Structure formats: C-alpha cells, structure tokens
Image (cartoon, rainbow, N blue to C red):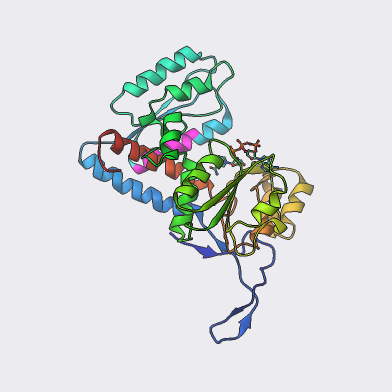
Amino acid sequence: MSLFYSSLDLPPASRFPGLSSNGAIYHERMARVLDGAAIAAEIKAEVKAEVERLVAQGIRPGLAAVLVGNVPASEIYVRSKVKTCEALGLFSELITPPETVTTKEMLALIERLNAREDIDGILVQLPLPPQVNAKQLLEAVSPDKDVDGFHPVNVGRLQTGQPALAPCTAEGIIEILKRSRLPIAGQNAVVVGRSDIVGKPTAILLLAENATVTVCHSKTRDLGSFTRQADILVAAIGKPALITVEMVKPGATIVDAGINRVTDRAQFQRYFAGNERREEAFLQKGSTIVGDVLPAAYEQAGAYTPVPGGVGPLTIAMLMANTVRAAKLRRGLPA
Ligand code: NDP
C-alpha cells in the first residue's frame, strides 16, 4: 500500500503553517491523498493468497454473475468483476439471460445457483429490466451467498453485530480508513446519503467501529451545520460537487464515494478551473468524473479519497473478499 501526497488533482497548495527539517516555518502542506487503487491492490493480493490456501484444501471459491440484457455500463462492470475473479484464482461464471427474461425464470435460475456446491457468491447486476421484480429476486438469493450484502437477513445481521456479508462499497470505505491508520473510534462521522447500498451500511459500519455517527439526506436542514462537525465526512449523494469548501472542517478526513460524469465545459470550469492536466484529459475525452465533493474542498481536508481512484477501486476488491468469506462461512471455517 502506498499513501502519498499529491498535487495531481488540486489547485495551488493549501496554506497551513508548519516546521521544515531545519526548523524554519513553511506554509505549504498538501492534504493526504488516500490512494484507493493501492489499497484495493493490497486487498486483492491478500485475497489471492487466501484463495491459494483454500485451493490447497480442495476449495475453490466461486462467483456467479448474472447480467440481464445489454446495458453497456453493466456489461463493463460485470466483465471487470469476472476478470478480477480469474486474476485472483476464483472460479467464476457469467450468466446472461435475455432482456425478455421473466421474474419466474430468474427465480428458477437463482434457485439453481443457491443449490450449486461450486458457487459461493451470487451477484445479480442492477438495474434489471422493468418486468423483473428486483426486490423479490434479491430476496431469493441465499443470504449465505449474498456477496453484495443486499439481503434483509444480512442487513439485520450487520445491524445486530453478527457475522454478515455487507455491501461492498461500505466495506471498502471502512478498509480505506483502517488501512490508512486513520482513527475512527470516538470521531464525529457524518454520512451524507442514506441509500441501502452505500449510506446506511457505511453508517452502521462506522457505528460498529465506535464513531459517533450522523446521517444526513435530502431533507436535512442546513446540511453544512452538520458536515462542519465531521472529523470523518462521507459523501454518498450522487450530486456533483455538492459539498463545498465552507462545509468542510479543516483537517477532516473526506471520503468521497460520488461518481458523477461531467460533459459540460462550463460545469467543468466550475469544478476544475486551473487544473491543466484534468483539462487536457477532458478535452481529449469530452468528459470527466467528479465526486460529490468540490475538488477545492479537498484542500481543507487532512486526508481525502480522490475521484477517480479513491473509493471506486475498493468495490470490486471487497466483492472478491466477500466471495472468499462466503466460501469459508458456508463451510464453517473461521472467516
Ligand atoms: P442514491 O441516489 O441511492 O442515494 C443518494 C442519497 O443522497 C439519498 O439518501 C439522498 O437523500 C441523498 N441526497 C440527495 N440529494 C441530497 C442533498 N441535496 N443533500 C443531502 N443529501 C442528498 O445513491 P447511491 O447511494 O447509490 O450512490 C451515491 C453516490 O455514490 C453516487 O454518486 C454513486 O454513483 C456512487 N457510488 C459509488 C460506488 C463506488 O463504487 N464508488 C458504488 C455505488 C455508488 P434521500 O434519501 O432523502 O433521497
């Protein structure tokens, strides 16, 4: 794992006074960048080693990925999940029912996967076509194979502190904090967003790590009055650059889960003015990704996850870790 200080995504440096090695006061200090890609690589290396140990005992953890229809973004996600399985030595199977599949057919497929001995994890890529009852389907996945952590049984287990498969992005956020040796216990953590996939499970996991947790959402009055209290600020909103400079407590840790595509030139300028490297890439590609936090606000932070390259890479790494965990839990091995 490497944690580094970088000026890649930032406008001119923050100005915090400090002491140089010869004792002189200096005024340039960058916020610490939490390198999600490096942390994800570290986790994947651990998963690979664990898979080798299990294979030596005759157990090869297996993931079934179900991809319905031809949604290009879903295809990219699922194929990269399957490719990662292969790279780490897990068994994987990609199942691609047609766009016209019915709920009944999907339920029959899930039932078969639940019964298969070589499958430890079942992933149903969302979104599903409108004729398929997604809720019914996700609840049909055996909780023991629910590597996305969406099943109500796993939600309940997580809430009550029992061994559970938890949603991968939330787990990834905790891994970033822990592996970066950032304190969680006793810290004021503010999570903006309360989705079942990111916000809520992140809040539950932070609480389990003894943070004092506040959850904000679209009906929260005066959002800034809460975010300014945060030692750890998690943004999982899906609104580009919603968290601005004055909403961040100086020195806080910012975890920005947002992934928002920007194609408009004026919008780009609002978020990234002065960042020549980004601008070059934007002009070449015609788009860029911005998080839920305004890049200038990262400067206020003590540490932050960049977008891209922060939380994003952890999601697949944690899916792999969850599949291995499911394989062990299902066989009664310590996990
Ligand atoms: P959802 O749309 O399901 O949830 C968004 C949450 O943000 C809701 O709880 C909503 O409140 C809240 N919200 C919306 N507007 C505001 C506002 N103005 N002020 C305060 N809160 C607000 O999104 P997800 O949780 O699925 O995703 C959040 C972000 O994380 C997205 O950018 C998504 O792309 C990204 N993501 C990243 C992943 C990764 O791997 N890095 C994985 C999954 C998601 P309310 O409940 O009141 O509507």
Nearest to the observer: residue 133 or residue 36: 133
Magenta stretch holds residue 86: yes
- The quadrant the N terminus occupies is bottom left
Nearest to the observer: residue 3 or residue 163: 163
Query: Residue pushed farthest left?
Result: 57
Q: Which residues are magenta?
A: 78-88
Residue at 40% from the left image edge and 42% from the top image edge: 161
**Position in image of residue 268 (x %, y %):** 74, 49
Does 70 appear above or below 76?
Answer: above
Q: Main SS type for the magenta part?
A: helix
Residue at 35% from the left image edge and 23% from the top image edge: 114
Does 25 appear above or below 328?
Answer: below
In-image side of 32 versus 47 (left or right): right
**Position in image of residue 134 (x %, y %):** 52, 22
In-image side of 155 versus 74 (left or right): left
Q: Which quadrant of the view contains residue 165?
A: top left
Residue at 45% from the left image edge and 37% from the top image edge: 81
Q: Which quadrant of the view contains residue 111?
A: top left
**Position in image of residue 137 (x %, y %):** 47, 21
**Position in image of residue 301 (x %, y %):** 61, 62
Magenta stretch holds residue 74: no
Nearest to the observer: residue 307 or residue 166: 166
Nearest to the observer: residue 283 or residue 288: 288
Tell me if I can see residue 101 in this picture.
yes
Residue at 56% from the left image edge and 86% from the top image edge: 23
Quadrant in which ligand 1 is drawn: top right
Q: Which quadrant of the view contains residue 15?
A: bottom right
- The quadrant the C terminus occupies is top left
In-image side of 109 versus 57 (left or right): right
Tell me if I can see residue 96 in this picture.
no
